[in-house]
Image (spheres, coloured by chain):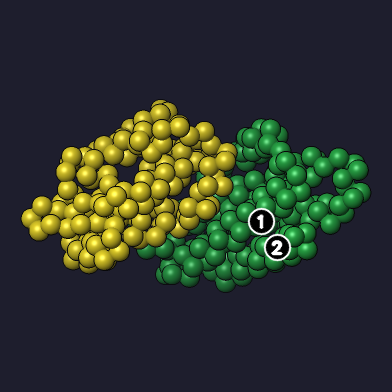
């Protein structure tokens, strides 16, 4: 998943959590980048027609941005579920965050063939717990 | 979240190599099942596809072993590969492509996906300054060798597909 996809996914999740535009600061925090880097990428996303930024309010995805974000979130869900259910990784959230930049969506599609994902994916992804609601893992508690 | 494509630790590298092993397992299982799905008569009629699938399964098994050797040298916990084998088997025992075109197209997807995976992994290792516990040059040369074989696989399947158009 490339950097732009990671940004649109983060904006999408923040919009869900905040029920409104994503604040640039919150976006920078989520991606662990500087506010300057976040602003630069937001500008690029605007140029590509994926997001709109309004000063003092924050950034919102366009319809095209939402489609892209949902695809990226689906890829992320596949990685999380694959790690948790196939490789039995306890810290699957943290590892999925580390691996998502290296796993392409075509590769995720192949991994998807050996996991069972819920039909409503990615709507079952809970941004608060950073995992699918149906992902049953007993050994790990959600990140604080 | 980790922005930028780079491998930052032994652990992360081991995990990516494990994903590679599973991908190879998937390729091997699909090729094997496709091969099994051919009737005796079809095998006689289509020696080219038979050879292609046999070769794909053998090559994937060999790639898996090479990746497993690298994983063994890294400081990482083991993964229950017997369980994964069973899981992959269970998934692919049920699927059958309808015809030769389906088999070839699926095989093309397998090879292309594997190529993309190794290409991204090589780029991520090259972008990293991390000292891995496995020799970097050996790691990269192994991954590049495998990537080249996947590229050759893509070419071969494409060639066979083109001759059938």
The residue beneath circle 2 is B158
Q: Which residue is drawn at 87% across and 54% down?
A: B47
Do the residues bearing badges 2 and 1 touch, measured as CB atoms within 8 Å? Answer: yes
- The chain carrying label 2 is B
From this view, report whether residue B96 is shown above or below residue B3. Answer: above
User: Residue farthest to the left?
Assistant: A56
Image quadrant occupied by the C terminus of chain A: top left
Between B104 and B143, which is closer to the camera in this rendering? Answer: B104
Chain A drawing hue: yellow
Q: Give the image quarter of residue A125.
A: top left
Left or right side of B25 for B52? right
Q: Which residue is painted at 71% across and 42% down in the image?
A: B97
User: CA gap, disc 2 to disc 1?
Assistant: 7 Å
Say which residue label 1 marks. B108
Residue A26 rendering spot, x and y as whole percentages:
18, 51
Front-most of residues A97 and B134: A97
Q: Circle 1 marks a residue in which chain? A: B
**Residue A116 as seen in the image, left or right of residue A133:** right
Q: Chain B is drawn in which colour?
A: green
Q: What element carries label 2?
A: helix
The number of numbered badges drawn on the structure is 2
Identified at 64% across, 46% down, the residue is: B26
Secondary structure at numbered mark 1: helix
Marked residue nearer the N-terminal end (2 or 1): 1
Query: In the image, residue B78 lies at what x, y percent?
Result: 56, 44
Within 10 angstroms of label 2, few (less than 14), some, or many (20 or more) residues?
some
């Amino acid at each position: 998943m490339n950097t732009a996809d990671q940004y649109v996914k983060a904006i999408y999740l923040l919009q869900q959590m905040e029920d409104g535009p994503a604040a640039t600061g919150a976006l920078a925090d989520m991606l662990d980048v500087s506010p300057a880097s976040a602003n630069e990428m937001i500008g690029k996303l605007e140029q590509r027609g994926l997001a709109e930024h309004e000063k003092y309010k924050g950034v919102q995805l366009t319809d095209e941005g939402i489609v892209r974000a949902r695809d990226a979130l689906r890829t992320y869900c596949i990685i999380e579920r694959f790690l948790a259910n196939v490789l039995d990784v306890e810290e699957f959230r943290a590892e999925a965050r580390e691996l998502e930049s290296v796993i392409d969506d075509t590769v995720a599609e192949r991994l998807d063939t050996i996991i069972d994902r819920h039909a409503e994916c990615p709507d079952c992804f809970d941004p608060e717990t950073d995992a699918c609601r149906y992902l049953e893992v007993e050994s790990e508690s959600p990140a604080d | 979240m980790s922005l930028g494509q780079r491998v930052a630790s032994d652990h992360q590298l081991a995990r990516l190599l494990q994903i590679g092993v599973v991908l190879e397992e998937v390729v091997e299982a699909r090729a094997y099942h496709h091969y099994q799905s051919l009737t005796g008569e079809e095998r006689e009629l289509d020696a080219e596809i038979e050879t292609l699938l046999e070769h794909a399964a053998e090559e994937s098994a060999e790639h898996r072993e090479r990746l497993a050797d690298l994983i063994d040298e890294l400081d990482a916990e083991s993964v229950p590969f017997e369980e994964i084998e069973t899981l992959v088997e269970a998934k692919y025992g049920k699927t059958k492509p309808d015809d030769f075109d389906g088999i070839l197209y699926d095989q093309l997807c397998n090879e292309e996906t594997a190529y993309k995976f190794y290409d991204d992994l090589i780029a991520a290792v090259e972008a990293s300054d991390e000292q891995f516990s496995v020799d970097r040059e050996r790691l990269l040369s192994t991954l590049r060798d495998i990537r080249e074989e996947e590229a050759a696989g893509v070419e071969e399947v494409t060639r066979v597909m083109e001759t059938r158009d």
